[in-house]
Amino acid sequence: MMSNDISGSPSLSGRWVQLWLGVLCMALIANLQYAWTLFVDPMHVARGWGLAEIQWAFSIFIATETWLTPAAGAIVDRLGPRRGPSLTIAAGGLLVGIGWVVNAYAGSLVYLYIGAAVSGTGAGAIYATCVGNAVKWFPDRRGLAVGLTAAGFGAGAALTVIPIRLTIGAAGYAQAFLWFGIGQAVILVIVSRVLRGPDQPIVLANKANANLQQSTGSCTSMEMLRSPTFWLLYVMFLGVSASGLMATAQLGPIAKDYGISNTAIFFGASTLSVALVVDNILNGLARPFFGALSDRIGRERTMALAFTLGAISYWLLAVAGYTPWAFVVCAGLIFFTWGEIFSLFPSTCTDTFGPKYATTNASLLYTAKGTSAFLVPLANVLKAYTGTWESVFLVAAVTNVVVVLLALFVLRPLRVSQLRRAQLPAPS
């Protein structure tokens, strides 16, 4: 067990290098989720596939990217800190590249779905490894470290949205899949050689901030799965993730239906292009911002603040998002108040269940994102039934309000009780 002052500890040597390499890896796998909306209409036009049929590929990617992460996390934990992260990142990079190449040459929906599954499996392995490394290396700044790591996934696509769209416009969507996929895979394999975890689990004692009491022990995955706290976290993650993914996957069609998708608003850039860049940047900034805030005021209070703002953001898009700049601002607010789930939930999970099995345990919680992906096509169904996107946004707003109530009045008492049973000081 280590003291509060860990800055000079030799066991933590190089942890910032490991963190920033993890951020880079996350940025390299972000495109297929956050730039996916750019590929939807070109595939629809070129192949004649229905929009709902194409969106099932998105759902498959999200499902495999999340549901298979516990297996990747278990491999990392079993292989150990020296070999686990390196080998898993390399394998994941190769799978991501292969999946994008399959998408490039897919002549049927079956092959498109196969490409989505392969790339999702690789992305999930990388995601699990990088988040696991962050929560293990930074017990003193867990929210910030996971937030920065997750920011690579949320904001990384901002650097490539415009190049991808230009490539699609000049050479077609297939070439964009091909060249960006190969480039990502090469860099990931190179970076994998340097990644590792801490040699021993790092646990902090005598925390000065009572809001951030952490378990000094570690629960195995089976012990965690028997805890009602885990399943409550899962349901909360599921609700907020589903509402955010609906906006992520449908942003292009929404802008098109509003008649503003190709309206030039900033140095010749279209509304959709500007919105995607702004959204990815704010999505990324939200993760370290709210993660660091949760290190100071506590996880549940930060959840309540972020998800309340999220509910307001969905409502604003429903009632005021019809003009180009209003659309950009409202969509940006949604992304800013959604992306923090990927820093808050892994941090809360590791605080509650300990660091030793953190890669596997955080990955099990992360599967809620995969479950939520299958709710994404329901947005199209609801829109078709009601005739407007407003109904989708209002459902998302209500979902966020429900999660706020769960965080304050159910999750917090459960965690207090669990810490008391473990004879630890409870959060104030």
Image: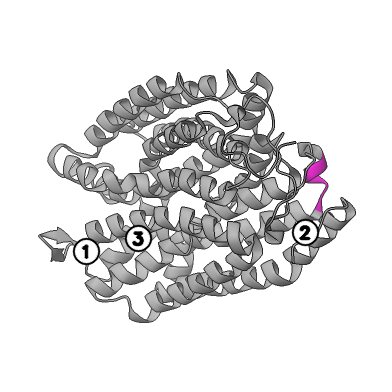
Residue 312 horizontal side relative to residue 43, left or right: right
Q: Secondary structure at mark 1?
A: helix
Is 147 rendered above or below residue 293? Answer: above
Q: Which residues are magenta?
A: 223-227
- Tell me how far mark 2 sits from mark 3, CA to CA: 36 Å
Q: Residue furthest left?
A: 268
- Mark 2 — residue? 415
- Tell me how far mark 2 sits from mark 1, CA to CA: 44 Å
Mark identifier at residue 271: 1
- Tell me how far mark 1 sits from mark 3, CA to CA: 11 Å
The amino acid beneath tag 2 is Arg
Front residue of this view, candidates 262 and 267: 267
* Pointer 1 or 3: first along the chain: 3
Front residue of this view, candidates 171 and 162: 162
Q: Main secondary structure of the magenta part?
A: helix
Q: Residue 428's x, y, as percent?
A: 74, 67
Mark 2: few/some/many CA within 10 Å (<14, 14-19, 20+):
many
- Mark 3 — residue? 251
Front residue of this view, candidates 245 and 307: 307
Mark 3: few/some/many CA within 10 Å (<14, 14-19, 20+):
many
Residue occupying the point 10% across, 60% down: 267
The amino acid beneath tag 1 is Thr
* Pointer 2 or 3: first along the chain: 3
In this orientation, does residue 387 appear? no
Q: Residue 118's x, y, as percent?
A: 47, 30
Q: Are marks 2 and 3 in contact (CB under 8 Å)?
A: no
Residue 301 horizontal side relative to residue 114, left or right: right
